[in-house]
Image: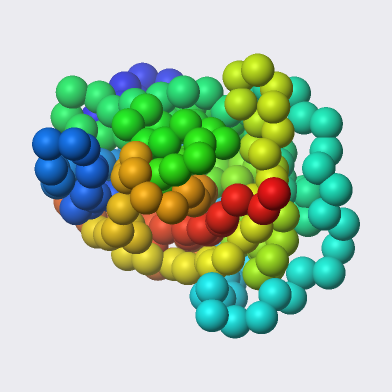
Amino acid sequence: MIETRNYPDARWNRVALTVVVICTVAGATAGVLAFTSPPAPPTAQLAPVLAPFTAAGPDTYTGPTEVPNLPPDTLSIPGVDLKVSLVDEGRDDSGYLVIPESSKAARYTGSAAVCAAKGSTLLAGHVNFPDGSLAPMVSLVQVAKGMPLYVSDKSGVTCRYKITSLESLAKTSLPPGSFATEGPPLLRVVTCDLASPFVRIAGHAQFANNTIATAIPWP
């Protein structure tokens, strides 16, 4: 469990990312991953309802696709005005994802590196601040199919990805292979789905679903 001393009056939102298969040379290992988030925002601040799409459909984005000049360790989706700094994080002793403060997002050790030529890169961040106000990651729900996503590594090299799917999944699952270090390269960005019910799961008040955007390299 993440230390909660900074949020003494908050209702905690544990986002369970469970039954994630970690592919290694030795075989597959199942792990239970989760992170805690601040409380639900006021109703008036709720994000738009997610409109899911899959890789099978046509691209709908028609805006600019030029690669921007990003500082190192940055995630940017200009089409929805999302830009956050990235920090490396892992899991605590209980297996829960460690999430940075709400103005940032994390890349998880154990997943593929940013700009990796193979494997799945996992990024995640809080959808709101401790007072319930909306964080930058709330914009993820508004992405469109074919929209460019940019991410820079520690040296400042920026890679372009194309968003291919957007979905809302119960917090008991992630797409298979989200921590794979082999196989086709892709990137997943995860945050809470603010349009999902605010419920109690495992004794904690939390949003029932995750918003997950998947993207593939776009040379």
Q: For this rendering, which residue is in front, 181 or 53?
A: 181
Give coordinates of residue 44: x percent, y percent: 65, 61
Identify the image quadrant of residue 97. top left
Question: Residue at the location (60% across, 46% down)?
Answer: 137
Question: Residue at the location (24% across, 59% down)?
Answer: 172
Q: For this rendering, which residue is in front, 78 or 25?
A: 25
Identify the image quadrant of residue 10. top left
How is the protein colored in the picture? Answer: rainbow
* Residue 169 versus residue 57 in the image, above or below: above
Give coordinates of residue 11: x percent, y percent: 37, 42
Give left or right: position of 49 versus 32.
right
Question: Residue at the location (65% across, 17% down)?
Answer: 155
Give coordinates of residue 119: x percent, y percent: 40, 44
Give coordinates of residue 162: x percent, y percent: 65, 57
* Residue 156 versus residue 196 in the image, above or below: above
The image quadrant where one finds the N terminus is top left
Q: For this rendering, which residue is in front, 26 or 152?
A: 26
Give left or right: position of 169 versus 136.
left
Marks counted in the figure total: 0
For residue 124, say whether it is visible: no
Give left or right: position of 78 versus 193.
right
For residue 183, say whether it is visible: yes
Q: For this rendering, which residue is in front, 128 or 214?
A: 214
Identify the image quadrant of residue 84. top right
Question: Residue at the location (43% across, 53% down)?
Answer: 184
